[in-house]
Image (cartoon, helix red, strand yellow):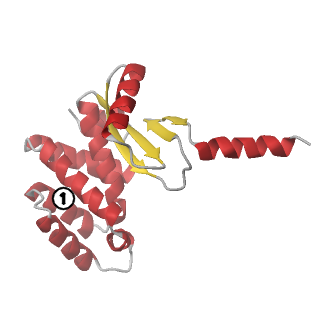
Amino acid sequence: MSSETTDVATGVTGLSGRYATALFDLADGASALDQVADDLRQVSAMIDESDDLKRMVRSPVISRGDQSSAMQALLEKAEASELTRNFIGVVASNRRLFALTDIINDYLMILAGRRGEMTAEVSSAKALSESQQAEIISALESSVGGKVSLNSTVDSDLLGGLVVKIGSRMVDSSLQTKLQHLKLAMRGVG
């Protein structure tokens, strides 16, 4: 599968898409698609959980050597594969760590596309239970007619309800959005 086909098939574009496609091709050649995906999910979780790490990967002030050393230490602690370590080392030396989260998301999207899966991004006010996640997956799979994996996040700004995004389609059933629409409607009355 050429990288052009991969880009078109999954919709990944731009800088992050090019890096993700390159990593996908390397991982595919090394029969390490799942290992790299697991490594990347772990890195993404570490970035999400640490404000210091978020600042470090986005900072243009921190030298590329310091960024690279810090990332390599994290990857070693996480017992990431050599392929993942080398790849993130290249990303750091090219001063592209600011795009790492997008690269990870694009890689996972390419992998899901290759397997005929779709990933649904679900935001909720509170963490979803396993049974709630299973219900959402079931409803989405029957709606889209294919396998769906869930990437759920908690958005404390939401008052209730869900925001679900699959590809370019988004369903916003959040209470916050409903209240905003009501507020706008009320301005027009009277």
Q: Quadrant of the N terminus?
A: top left
Residue 169 x, y percent position in the rendering? 49, 33
Task: Report the front residue among 128 and 172.
Answer: 128
Secondary structure state at the residue bearing disc 1: helix
Residue 141 is left or right of residue 22, and the answer is right
Q: Residue furthest right?
A: 190
Res. 145 visible in picture: yes
Image: 133 above or below 125: above
Task: Report the front residue among 15 and 54.
Answer: 54
Residue 178 x, y percent position in the rendering? 65, 41
Please report the residue visible at 45 percent of the width from the left and 45 percent of the height from the top. 123
Q: Amino acid at mark 1?
A: Phe
Residue 153 x, y percent position in the rendering? 40, 49
Task: Report the front residue among 126 and 37.
Answer: 126
Mark 1 Cα-neighbour bin, 10 Å: few <14, some 14–19, many ≥20: some
What is the number of callouts on the image?
1
Q: Quadrant of residue 150?
A: top left
Residue 168 is left or right of residue 186, and the answer is left
Q: Quadrant of the C terminus?
A: top right
Residue 130 is left or right of residue 65, and the answer is right
Please report the residue visible at 22 percent of the width from the left and 56 percent of the height from the top. 42
State the residue position of label 1: 87
Please report the residue visible at 16 percent of the width from the left and 69 percent of the height from the top. 72
Res. 96 visible in picture: no
Please report the residue visible at 22 percent of the width from the left and 48 percent of the height from the top. 22
Image: 173 above or below 27: above
Residue 186 x, y percent position in the rendering? 81, 43
Task: Report the front residue among 170 and 88.
Answer: 170
Residue 114 is left or right of residue 17, and the answer is left
